[in-house]
Image (cartoon, rainbow, N blue to C red):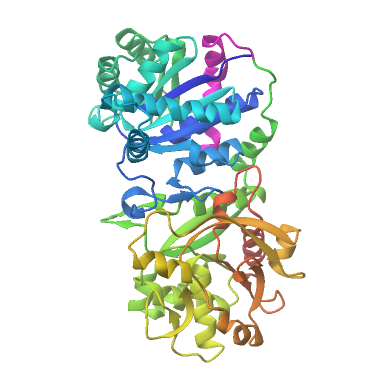
């Protein structure tokens, strides 16, 4: 039986330049060649998972079916591979240490002295092997967060070195390095990459491939220079220029025959040559026939003078997937809900948009501005899609302005208000004991849809499963009055009798739908999420 092959992907000069997309793209290329592929993200944080991290600092917290709260790169893996991942696809420094300490407490080391080296790298390798055994994958891609020069990554680099020492023919190392072009010089510089490779060499690792990230494609002279000073074959220096869409990256990599170069090093042959669907997707992206303008009303995107789109990356990608389906180019505009609170006259600007989204979030900052935006969309029949907090705020807006419950609010924001949105009982017990990490309603839950609703028609089935991440729910005590006044409870989790989807009938509004779950987590470019697809359809119709 052929052995599983391992490809480690690490950063060279700086973070945030596309290791996750590189990993995802390698996975897609190998999958198109007929192989079973999975991926692991290693985050160098002491946090056990990503659930307790601030989205402005860390970016979006992605959630898997099993409830794992993890780095957004797992979302990229799922979108590119079209596979559902789990807790076995993610590890942090914290989770590795915790696992090792728990084993030590159980006397699994039989009294031996447990040390950082070799036991931490051994634990990393054991986790990789666990995924291998579970999936029987041909390839496991392991992305190491951060860069090679960071102290906290040494243990993970050591795991790569140790695994290659044991299985020299089964491990490749790929370094993603940035090649700057200083404005004052106008020339692509290779020196930072040379230093990064030397740092990697000092950890006992020689890269097999260098992904040359830059504003433009790396040219022949630069490839030759990197080859000479870094000891890498010119053919294994893969050009990765800036491009409009991340989904073009696998196609771009294949211009340098990247997939076949990987297989050649492993002495493997492609089982098939596929990629028709992906090429069709790229064609749709590159040849749009229309535009759609979407506003996102949120608060997790401001960091100083910069806009941090990573806080809502899955929402952005789900919008793109649905837009590509209709050969449309989405124009996404970020709108600060706090500005609507300060100046409600600005709400009239929403008429310029084809559709509006209020995504998830926590805390009361900017909440009243979001409620004003939702009310404006309802009254002016602007297609609206609420996600998690967006559903809760839609329910509050409807309770206040249609049902006449003027003090309607969430207990998260005002404990003295009419609790249209309240915390689940089990959540109250957990928070009383300060149990925050990994304790929300997390992961996939079933939902039963009501016939003849927008949601039912979108999915085409009565039973669905979607992913959650929240502590608060629509209070069932208010369901009767909400429904009596015209709000449709379109989806319910029957096990706990919890409202999952609310909407207005199509005859009253073209698209006014909100979900307690996060539909964006299960969207991928080859299969847009059904509700996002229908939202974009409504937005395109509005533009006509």
Identify whether 100 is placed above or below 531: above
Residue 265 on the magenta span: yes
Depth order, front residue of 512/57: 57
Q: Quadrant of residue 136?
A: top right
What quarter of the picture does the C terminus occupy?
bottom right
Residue 251 in view of the camera: no
Residue 100 at x, y percent in the picture: 35, 34
Give me the residue at 36% from left, 52% from top.
Answer: 308
Secondary structure mostly seen in magenta is helix
Residue 327 at x, y percent in the picture: 65, 48
Depth order, front residue of 134/112: 112
Q: Quadrant of residue 250?
A: top right
What quarter of the picture does the N terminus occupy?
top right
Residue 442 at x, y percent in the picture: 50, 56
Residue 262 at x, y percent in the picture: 52, 16
Residue 345 on the magenta span: no
Give me the residue at 59% from left, 49% from top.
Answer: 523
Q: How many marks?
A: 0
Identify whether 53 is placed above or below 86: below
Magenta part of the chain = 243-269
Depth order, front residue of 370/350: 370
Identify whether 452 is placed above or below 180: below
Residue 219 in view of the camera: yes
Left or right side of 303 for 474: right
């Amino acid at each position: 039986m052929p052995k599983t092959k391992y490809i480690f992907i690490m950063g060279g000069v700086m973070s945030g330049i596309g290791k996750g997309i590189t990993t995802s793209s390698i996975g897609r290329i190998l999958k198109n060649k007929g192989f079973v592929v999975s991926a692991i993200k290693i985050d160098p944080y002491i946090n056990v998972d990503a659930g307790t991290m601030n989205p402005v600092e860390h970016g979006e917290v992605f959630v898997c079916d099993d409830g794992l709260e993890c780095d957004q790169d797992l979302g990229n893996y799922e979108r590119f591979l079209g596979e559902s991942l789990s807790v076995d696809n993610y590890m942090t420094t914290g989770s590795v240490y915790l696992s090792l300490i728990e084993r030590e407490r159980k006397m699994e080391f039989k009294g031996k002295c447990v040390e950082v080296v070799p036991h931490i790298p051994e634990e990393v390798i054991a986790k990789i092997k666990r995924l291998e055994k579970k999936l029987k994958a041909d390839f496991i891609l392991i992305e190491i967060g951060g860069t090679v020069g960071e102290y906290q990554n040494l243990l993970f680099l050591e795991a790569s070195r140790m695994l290659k020492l044991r299985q020299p023919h089964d491990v490749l190392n790929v370094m993603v390095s940035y090649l700057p072009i200083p404005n004052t010089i106008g020339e692509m510089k290779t020196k930072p990459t040379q230093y990064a490779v030397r740092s990697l060499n000092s950890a006992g690792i020689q890269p097999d491939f260098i992904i040359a990230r830059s504003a433009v494609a790396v040219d022949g002279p630069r490839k030759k220079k990197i080859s000479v000073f870094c000891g890498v074959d010119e053919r294994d220096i893969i050009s990765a220029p800036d491009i409009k869409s991340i989904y073009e990256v696998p196609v771009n990599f294949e211009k340098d025959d990247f997939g076949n170069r990987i297989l050649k090093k492993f002495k493997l042959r492609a089982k098939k040559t596929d990629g028709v669907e992906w090429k069709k997707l790229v064609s749709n992206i590159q040849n749009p026939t229309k535009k759609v303008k979407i506003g996102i009303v949120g608060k997790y995107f401001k960091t100083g003078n910069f806009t941090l789109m990573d806080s809502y990356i899955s929402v952005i990608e789900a919008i793109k997937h649905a837009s590509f389906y209709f050969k449309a180019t989405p124009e996404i505009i970020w709108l600060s809900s706090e500005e609507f609170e300060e100046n409600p006259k600005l709400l009239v600007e929403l008429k310029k948009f084809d559709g509006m989204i209020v995504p998830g979030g926590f805390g009361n900052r900017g909440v009243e501005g979001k409620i004003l935006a939702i009310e404006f969309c309802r009254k002016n029949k602007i297609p609206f899609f609420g996600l998690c907090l967006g559903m809760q705020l839609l329910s509050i807006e409807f309770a206040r302005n249609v049902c006449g419950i003027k003090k309607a609010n969430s207990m998260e924001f005002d404990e003295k208000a009419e609790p249209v949105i309240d915390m689940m009982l089990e959540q109250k017990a957990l928070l009383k004991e300060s149990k925050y990490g990994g304790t929300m309603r997390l992961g996939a839950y079933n939902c039963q849809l009501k016939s003849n609703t927008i949601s039912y028609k979108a999915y085409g089935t009565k039973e669905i499963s979607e992913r959650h991440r929240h502590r608060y729910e629509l209070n069932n005590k208010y369901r009767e009055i909400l429904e009596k006044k015209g709000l449709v409870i379109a989806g319910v989790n029957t096990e706990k009798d919890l409202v999952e989807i609310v909407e207005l009938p199509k005859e009253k509004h073209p698209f006014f739908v909100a979900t307690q779950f996060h539909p964006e987590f299960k969207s991928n470019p080859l299969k847009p999420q059904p509700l996002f697809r229908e939202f974009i359809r409504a937005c395109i119709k509005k533009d006509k």
